């Protein structure tokens, strides 16, 4: 019992169901329980009235049975309608928390858990946690019916009333033990599903390399092993569930049989009448059945507890420290950039970043500058500092003599724009993505023509071409077009991706030349590709400018 209370508290702390909707849901399941009992009572009264030739009372009782049936149907309709807001509030609240944790979580969180596992949690577990609040209400009606039934039976025969209480208690202890084993099996199933997701993702990511590395058979064996583990866990869950659905059901039939024999004994000794016998036998069966249905909440609780713990994997992520972003709303930026005595020592979580030591440089506004350096030279660290992804340990980064950390987010994002080798787009069309930064359709078309992308997308479907239908090259050129459409004062280009042709690179450099003297352009590269368009070149070696 104590363990189940702990599970409930853990679930409640996460789900936080809306109290108003939850109380309403309890009421809409309690009313049908009362109606169901009332229907049985008045239906029995109809039979008694007809036996006594009291036809008026029989008609009244029949009408009351119909009334309670209508009231029961109405209550269930209201219950169904209330389920969506009840579950939805918890669901949206949890998903909002997950979004914040994913966006702001430290990188170490994602190295500890595969993306596939996190996706599985997001897809399966959150709704299970939210839905349990409705499940509790539905199971509550069985408890309510049990209490009403036992109370009614106590009024007829006290020994039988005590018998029903004992049956319910025995059922609780047995089902709790069975459901504990079911819960463990269910947890194992979810873990094997995580593993299957991971292996399947590995196959997709490496399908073109499997033959070259001669590991196709190994990957196939790994895939089959994950399948076998899932089926084994599923089999164990099925066996455990069979104990509850079959053997425990048989046990309850035996309990009803023994209870019936006890009632026959009472009847044979004139301790109950035949009428009372028929009534109590009916309620004995209902009580046992209702106790089974109610105690199935233990299985649902343990499943919800497993889901809760899996969701908490994400919600317990450590968050990155918030950078001290200011509120300066100065929007007339000219584009002058200065790094003064800037140093940064990466932490273990700063994957791909290199230490930079006391860097100083000055970029006048509307000049083009190339930062040249090999891998791990410090280019990415400077790039991240310019983007305000990280803040310097020492020194200050300035734009127009103002600390870049002082600008508010909107001003900074509209005045400095960048393009990376793996650009990101929203799922949708070319036009829907570009429309986010520019509402002028003619300007969008002109820009696409400028980067020689318009003819390619016309062949595929024009502006309504799906992003997923673009090649890597086309996606990069689209990202370049988006950067131009944003009309920022500072343009930053981080490396040319390997999938671009020499012709593509020359095109990009040609377009950038048209902005010389008009915008501040910063290029990060491992070679001299853009040297001819740069006003100045900074060579970076081992975190220092040479």
Image: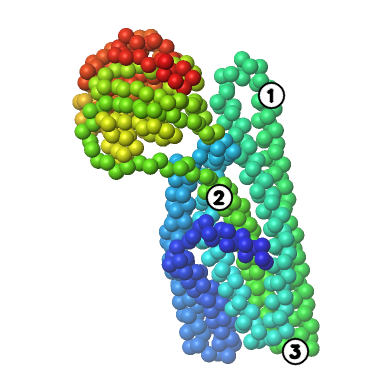
Secondary structure, mark 2, is helix
Residue 496 sits in quarter: top left
Q: Position of residue 36 (x, y in %)?
A: 54, 74
Question: Mark 2, residues whose alpha carbon is within 10 Å: few (<14), some, or many (≥20)?
Answer: some
- Residue located at (60% from left, 34% from top): 198
Earlier sequence position, callout 3 versus callout 2: 3
- Can you say whether 178 is above or below 473 in the image? below
Q: Residue at x 75, y 85 (%)?
A: 267
Pointer 1: residues within 10 angstroms few (<14), some, or many (20+)? few
Q: On residue 181, which mark appears?
A: none
- Label number found at residue 312: 2
Q: Secondary structure at mark 1?
A: helix
Residue 105 vs 523, above or below: the answer is below
**Which quarter of the rendered picture does the C terminus lie within?**
top left
Q: Measuring 23% from the left and 31% from the top, which residue is drawn there?
A: 333
First reached walking from the N terminus: tag 3 or tag 1: 1
Q: CA distance from mark 2 to mark 1?
A: 34 Å
- The residue tagged 3 is 271
Cα separation between marks 3 and 1: 75 Å
Q: Residue 186 placed where, x, y %?
A: 66, 49
> Which element is circle 3 on?
loop
For disc 1, the marked residue is: 218
* Tag in front: 3 or 2: 2
Residue 478, position in %: x, y? 33, 23
Towards the viewer: 14 or 190: 14
Q: Nearer the viewer, mark 2 or mark 1?
A: 2
Residues packed near mark 3 inside 10 Å, few (<14), some (14 to 19) or many (20 plus): some
Residue 214 percent location from the top left of the image: 66, 17
Instruction: Tell me if I can see residue 183 in this picture.
Output: yes
| Residue located at (57% from left, 23% from top) | 206
- In screen coordinates, is 529 left or right of 10? left
């Amino acid at each position: 019992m104590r363990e189940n209370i702990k599970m409930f508290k853990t679930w409640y702390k996460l789900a936080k169901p809306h109290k108003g909707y939850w109380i309403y849901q309890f009421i809409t399941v309690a009313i049908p329980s009362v109606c169901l009992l009332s229907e049985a009572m008045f239906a029995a009264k109809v039979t008694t009235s007809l036996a006594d030739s009291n036809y008026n009372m029989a008609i009244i009782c029949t009408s009351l049975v119909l009334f309670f049936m209508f009231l029961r149907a109405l209550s269930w309709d209201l219950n169904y309608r209330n389920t969506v807001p009840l579950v939805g509030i918890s669901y949206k609240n949890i998903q909002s928390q997950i979004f914040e944790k994913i966006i702001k979580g430290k990188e170490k969180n994602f190295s500890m858990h595969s993306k596939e596992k996190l996706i599985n949690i997001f897809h399966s577990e959150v709704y299970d946690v939210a839905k349990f609040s409705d499940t509790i209400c539905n199971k509550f009606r069985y408890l309510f019916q049990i209490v009403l039934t036992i109370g009614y039976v106590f009024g007829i025969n006290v020994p039988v009333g005590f018998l029903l209480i004992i049956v319910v208690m025995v059922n609780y202890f047995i089902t709790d033990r069975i459901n504990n084993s079911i819960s463990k099996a269910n947890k194992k199933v979810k873990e094997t599903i995580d593993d299957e997701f991971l292996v399947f993702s590995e196959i997709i990511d490496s399908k073109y390399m499997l033959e070259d590395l001669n590991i196709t058979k190994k990957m196939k064996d790994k895939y089959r092993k994950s399948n076998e583990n899932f089926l084994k866990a599923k089999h164990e869950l099925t066996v455990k569930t069979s104990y509850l659905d079959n053997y425990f059901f048989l046990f309850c039939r035996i309990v009803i049989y023994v209870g019936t024999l006890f009632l026959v004994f009472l009847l044979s000794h004139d301790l109950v009448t035949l009428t009372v016998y028929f009534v109590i036998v009916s309620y004995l069966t209902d009580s046992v059945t209702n106790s089974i249905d109610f105690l199935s909440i233990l299985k649902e609780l343990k499943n919800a507890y497993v889901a809760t713990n899996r969701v908490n994997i994400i919600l317990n992520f450590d968050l990155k420290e918030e950078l001290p972003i200011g509120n300066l709303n100065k929007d007339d930026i000219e584009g002058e950039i200065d790094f003064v005595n800037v140093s940064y020592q990466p932490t273990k979580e700063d994957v791909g970043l290199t230490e930079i030591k006391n860097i100083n440089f000055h970029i006048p506004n509307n000049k083009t500058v190339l930062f040249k350096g090999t891998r791990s030279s410090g280019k990415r660290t400077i790039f991240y500092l310019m983007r305000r992804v990280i803040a310097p340990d020492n020194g200050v980064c300035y734009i127009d003599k103002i600390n870049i950390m002082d600008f508010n987010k909107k001003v900074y994002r509209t005045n400095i724009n960048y393009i990376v080798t793996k650009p990101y787009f929203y799922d949708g069309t070319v036009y829907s993505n570009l429309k986010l930064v520019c509402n002028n359709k003619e300007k969008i078309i002109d820009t696409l023509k400028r980067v020689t992308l318009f003819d390619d997308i016309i062949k595929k479907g024009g502006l309504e071409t799906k992003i997923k239908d673009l090649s890597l090259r086309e996606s990069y050129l689209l990202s370049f077009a988006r950067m131009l459409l944003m009309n920022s004062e500072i343009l930053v280009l981080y490396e040319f991706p390997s999938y671009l042709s020499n012709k593509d690179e020359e095109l990009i450099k040609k377009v950038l030349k048209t902005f010389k003297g008009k915008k501040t352009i910063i290029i990060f590269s491992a070679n001299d590709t853009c040297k001819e368009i740069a006003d100045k070149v900074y060579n970076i070696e081992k975190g220092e400018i040479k």
